[in-house]
Image (tube, helix red, strand yellow):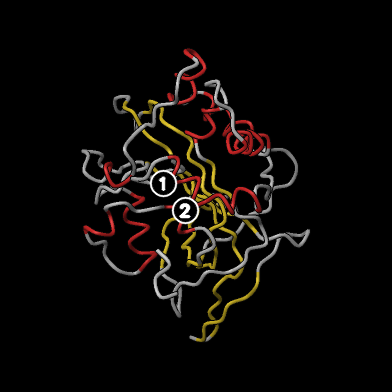
Amino acid sequence: MCIIVYISTIQFNQSIQPIIEDKIMGLTISSGGGDYENLEAGRYQATCYKLIDAGTREESYQDGPLRKRHIVYIYWEVTHKQEVDDGSERWEEVRMADGRPFSASKKYTASLNENAALFKDLKSWRGRPFSDADLAGFELPKVLGVTAELEMIKQNKDEVGGRVKVEGVYKPEGGMKKVTTSNDLQCFDIDVYAQEFSGKSTDESKAMCDMTEDMPPWMAEEIEQSFEVLAVRSKGAEPVPASGGLADLAKDDTKGDFDDDIDIPF
């Protein structure tokens, strides 16, 4: 359930199938080496273009105990930076040296618990609280192609230059819009991917395999070591979803302390 939530894999296939068929390839992220082009800290206009459901694993936080954590990554295409001169604000286009847009991402625990980073960022992104009805079946792929404003800060504030990270996600001025991105829209579904190894290969599961080939090695390894994939590879059985979806996770005891990380389209 590509981070979808509260709907079955079949429902996922129906809702996101056009994206899988038409927009399966996108920006290949370098795994390292060469010169790294970095954004500066500041406020940016961006659009979500990729979701990765990396599955479940055991991780610790700040040397705490190991516990199960269902990981999702959200990627944005960054297009403009806010500049302020003499109290006047303007948005200036930002591009990499080769003309491509910058890409920013954030790692989340797949939880809609009110203390979870994902819940907080989605709430500030849409610019209004979630109702019980909103949470009862929230489909994260709805954010694909939706504009946002990102607050970027330095990962290490004492480092000269250095990389930045997504600190906050906010509703853009003028409201959210569905727009066309330079990168193709992508949604990686861990459960559909795992079907490839259960003896029930489909066009959709093969498409997920193609997506892993374009991932950086560390991310592909995370997916291979997820409970969902390991269980299927060891038994050849039907993949068992890690959870009933984000709507169910919203009711759990997850504290959301992992931050490593149309009017209302969603």
Q: Helix, strand or loop at disc 1?
A: loop
Q: Quadrant of the C terminus?
A: bottom left
Based on the displayed image, in which of its 4 quarters is residue 238 positioned?
Answer: top left
Where on the picture, by quarter, is residue 255?
top left
| Label 1 neighbour load within 10 Å: few <14, some 14-19, many 20+ | many
Distance Cα–Cα, label 1 vs label 2: 7 Å
Please report the residue visible at 43 percent of the width from the left and 67 percent of the height from the top: 265
Name the residue carrying label 2: 141
Q: Is residue 242 left or right of residue 218?
A: left
Q: Is residue 211 above or below residue 64?
A: below
Position in image of residue 185 (x %, y %)? 60, 54
Vertical position of residue 111 compared to residue 133: above or below: above
Q: Residue furthest right?
A: 98
| Image quarter of the N terminus | top left
Residue at the top extreme, as displayed: 234
Amino acid type at mark 2 = Pro
Label 2 SS = helix
Q: Are marks 1 and 2 in contact (CB under 8 Å)?
A: yes
- 57 or 12, which lies in front? 12
Q: Which numbered dot is residue 49? A: none
Q: Mark 2 Cα within 10 Å, few/some/many (few <14, many 20+)?
A: many
- Is residue 232 shown left or right of residue 207? left
Q: Is residue 155 visible?
A: no
Give the camera-side residue of 17 and 28: 17
Q: In this view of the protein, can residue 238 be seen by the observer? A: yes
Kindly identify the residue that appears in the image at 25 percent across and 39 percent down.
Answer: 254
Q: Which residue is mark 1?
A: 4
Residue flagged by tag 1: what amino acid is it? Ile
Instruction: Please give the count of numbered marks on the rendered protein.
Output: 2
